[in-house]
Image (cartoon, grey):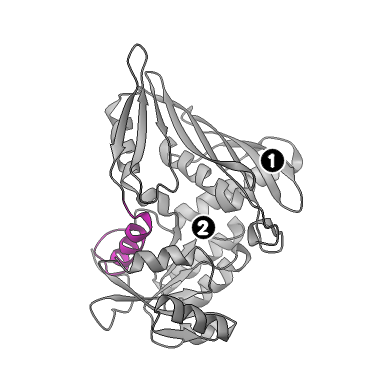
Amino acid sequence: MTQAPGVKKPAGRFWRWGILGTAQISTEIIRALRRSRNGILRAVASRNESKAREWARRYGIPLAFASYDEMLQSGEVDLIYNPLPTSLHAEWTMRALEAGLPVLCEKPFAANAVEARAVAARAAERGLPVAEAFMYRHHPQWARVAELVASGVIGEVSALHGQFTFLLDDRTQNPASAEMAGGALRDVGCYCVHFSRLIAGCEPSWVSAFEKRSCVDDLLLGLLEFPNGVLSHFETSIANFERHRAEIAGTAGALQLLNPWVPGDAPAVIRLLRPEAKSEEIVVPPADSYRLELDDFAAVCAGEIAPRWPAADAVANMAVLDALFASARERRAVSLP
């Protein structure tokens, strides 16, 4: 492997990360970087100077910047983590790329596929890595799932089911804001779509969706049809009680993931179901998905490993989200190219 042409090597042993904004999800990144094998947290930027300084003080971050641009142009950071509201993902990812900085952008990659393609094109022009921050896929339970599926223990995969729901009590937050490109599908349903594409191994040919909407999609039910015959259905909501579940059904059995998205510090449990056999629980030891995600991205930037999920994957996921929105809006099945 060789380092991406546009990437500048870090001045020291560790890649220096800068965080755009002070979103709550950033606290997971801060915690993970304390345990990183190849990165350190160097700076945080906010359009509110006092907030940036408060975060720097609270979390022991060396530098605080009063604007995003100031941090991007400072020469003090090597990599950018972008957890800004979804409506700002594309703009500030591209501005970081223009400053010569690779970007790990929080999911969803952009507000729509048009923006996602623009980001991917800019990264390619600049010779810089850019990736969507789906931390769940870095957890070792998914490698174990891939092994089980490949082994044939559940036969031929035929159906998938995903659930990612939670109750957003504070409706002033970004997931409840149309202006910020919020809503259930973009906020957490994107996990179910990505999981479906990952396991099916191809892109869906048709999608259908129904939604319960306020100013955003509070609840959305989706169905994906893949050209290899796999069907997937999922439920996502920001207005129902919390449920996390993924299931992979085959001709000879099924796999149930009891905490597929955010296992945290607990072991992950995969339940293997087969006819005429007792269910078996496969326990995967705890792992820090956020640290693994950050370390993998830095390793890609260093040219140590190839990107497992390049920008094209993020673009494809956004295209499915767009099609699901169109289906719910127009009340018809929508085909994808």
Magenta range is 287-306
Secondary structure under badge 2? Answer: loop
Question: Pointers 1 and 2 in contact (CB under 8 A)?
Answer: no
The amino acid type, in three-letter code, at marker 2 is: Lys
Q: Nearer the viewer, residue 157 or 274?
A: 274
Image coordinates for residue 51, horizontal then vertical, percent: 56, 80
Quadrant of residue 2 in the image? bottom left
Secondary structure under badge 1? Answer: helix
Instruction: Name the quadrant of the C terminus.
Output: top right
The amino acid type, in three-letter code, at marker 1 is: Ser
Query: Magenta includes 297?
Result: yes
Image coordinates for residue 180, horizontal then vertical, percent: 66, 63
For the point 52% across and 42% down, the residue is 192
Image coordinates for residue 179, horizontal then vertical, percent: 71, 63
- Residue 238 relative to residue 20: left or right: right
Give the answer, above or below, for where 41 lies relative to 219: below
Reading the image, the residue beneath label 2 is: 107
For the point 33% across and 17% down, the residue is 278
Give the answer, above or below, for where 233 lies relative to 180: above
Q: Nearer the viewer, residue 188 or 130?
A: 188
Q: Nearer the viewer, mark 1 or mark 2?
A: 2
Q: Earlier in the sequence, mark 1 or mark 2?
A: 2
Instruction: Name the quadrant of the N terminus.
Output: bottom left
Query: Magenta includes 170?
Result: no
Q: Nearer the viewer, residue 335 or 15?
A: 15
Give the answer, above or below, for where 266 lies relative to 105: above
For the point 55% across and 65% down, the residue is 118
Reading the image, the residue beneath label 1 is: 327
- Residue 68 relative to residue 126: left or right: right
